[in-house]
Image (cartoon, rainbow, N blue to C red):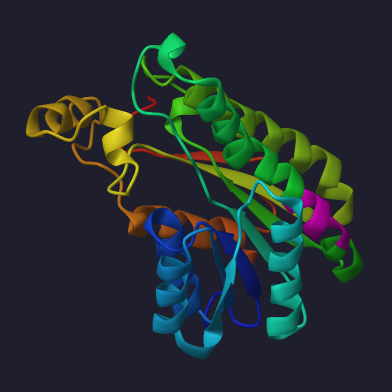
């Protein structure tokens, strides 16, 4: 018996990084998963590697029709949806705040914030009909302890944290739990953007702010996600957990 036996999860941005790690952990624990990603090649590759337990669906999380299709894919895959993981994210390169173009600002908030709204629009009615569910939002330590040079990204992740708490209170009567994870900078495709440049010196500078002395790994985030989305956490909602090696202490 796995900790996710009988459950179906929709995971956005699951073609790489933290989302891929969460998908692999959930499947290991018995879940069926929908791999939603805007990168078709990466998403399809992850789904194929996970076998019949996984299905890929193309999804730009800032588009209503794509999020509707992702939820529909979960129903088609297994007849239900138990968990929505809003993992897909976007950032600007580390730079002074006034050097970020308006188009890039808009994309950050569409992917990091609007996606949570669209996910709720399509998943919450289904959760209500089923008698409950779990929403896990992937925030960031940037929303808890902001770094210079990432102002607009920091703000988007602050919104994720506030939305998580507000959603948790409003949806509790429907037995829908809402939690968040706040990872520290990790070994993902966006690391070079957070740092501004990927050099040994910049890596050392970033790692020096993490008491446990390393970047986060997808497995770190996946382990925390497994707990918060499992029945073991059935009395936890509104929790915004730092997975940060002590960065936010």
Please provide percent x and percent y for residue 221: 41, 53
Report x, y in % for residue 1. Answer: 53, 86
Q: Which residues are magenta?
A: 119-125
Judged from this view, the residue extending furthest toward the left is 200
Quarter of image, res 15: bottom left
Q: Is residue 8 above or below residue 199?
A: below
Residue shown at 75% from the left, 48% from the top:
118
Residue under the image location 51 percent in, 62 percent down:
226
Position of residue 90 measured from the top left corner of the image (x, y, whole percent): 48, 40
Count all numbered tags in the image, as a single digit: 0
Answer left or right for 164 relative to 17.
right
Q: Nearer the viewer, residue 122 or 222?
A: 122
Q: Kindly identify the residue that appears in the image at 53 percent across and 82 percent down.
A: 30
Kindly report the secondary structure that dominates the magenta region of the rendered protein.
helix
Q: Is residue 129 above or below residue 138?
A: below
Please state if 212 lies on the left or on the right of 171 as rendered.
left
Q: Was residue 238 drawn as part of the magenta stretch in this picture?
A: no
Would you say residue 246 is visible in this rendering? no
- Examine the structure image and report whether residue 122 is included in the region drawn in magenta: yes
Q: Nearer the viewer, residue 87 or 61?
A: 61
- Answer with the quarter of the image where residue 244 lies: top left
Residue displayed at 70% across by 75% down: 73
Is 77 positioned to the left or the right of 151 in the image?
A: right
Is residue 182 in sight in this rendering?
Answer: yes
Quadrant of residue 50 in the image? Answer: bottom left
Image coordinates of residue 10 in percent, x first then y, are 62, 66
Question: Can you say which quadrant of the picture contains the C terminus?
Answer: top left
């Amino acid at each position: 018996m796995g900790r996710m036996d009988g459950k179906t999860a929709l995971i956005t941005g699951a073609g790489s990084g933290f989302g891929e790690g969460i998908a692999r952990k959930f499947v290991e624990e018995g879940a069926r998963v929908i791999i939603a990603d805007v990168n078709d090649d990466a998403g399809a590759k992850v789904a194929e590697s996970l076998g019949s337990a996984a299905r890929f669906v193309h999804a730009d999380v800032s588009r209503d029709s794509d999020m509707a299709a992702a939820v529909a894919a979960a129903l088609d895959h297994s007849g239900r949806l138990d968990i929505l993981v809003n993992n897909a994210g976007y950032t600007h390169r580390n730079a002074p705040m006034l050097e970020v173009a308006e188009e890039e600002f808009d994309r950050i908030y569409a992917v990091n914030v609007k996606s949570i709204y669209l996910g709720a629009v399509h998943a919450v009615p289904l959760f209500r009909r089923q008698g409950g569910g779990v929403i896990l939002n992937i925030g960031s330590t940037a929303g808890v302890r902001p770094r210079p040079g990432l102002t607009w990204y920091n703000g988007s992740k602050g919104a994720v944290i506030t939305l998580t708490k507000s959603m948790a209170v409003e949806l509790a009567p429907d037995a829908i739990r809402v939690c968040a994870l706040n990872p520290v900078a990790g070994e993902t495709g966006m690391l070079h953007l957070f740092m501004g440049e990927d050099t040994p010196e910049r890596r050392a500078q970033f790692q020096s702010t993490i008491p446990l002395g390393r970047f986060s790994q997808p497995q770190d985030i996946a382990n925390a996600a497994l707990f918060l989305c499992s029945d073991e956490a059935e009395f936890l909602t509104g929790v915004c957990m730092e997975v940060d090696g002590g960065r936010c202490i």
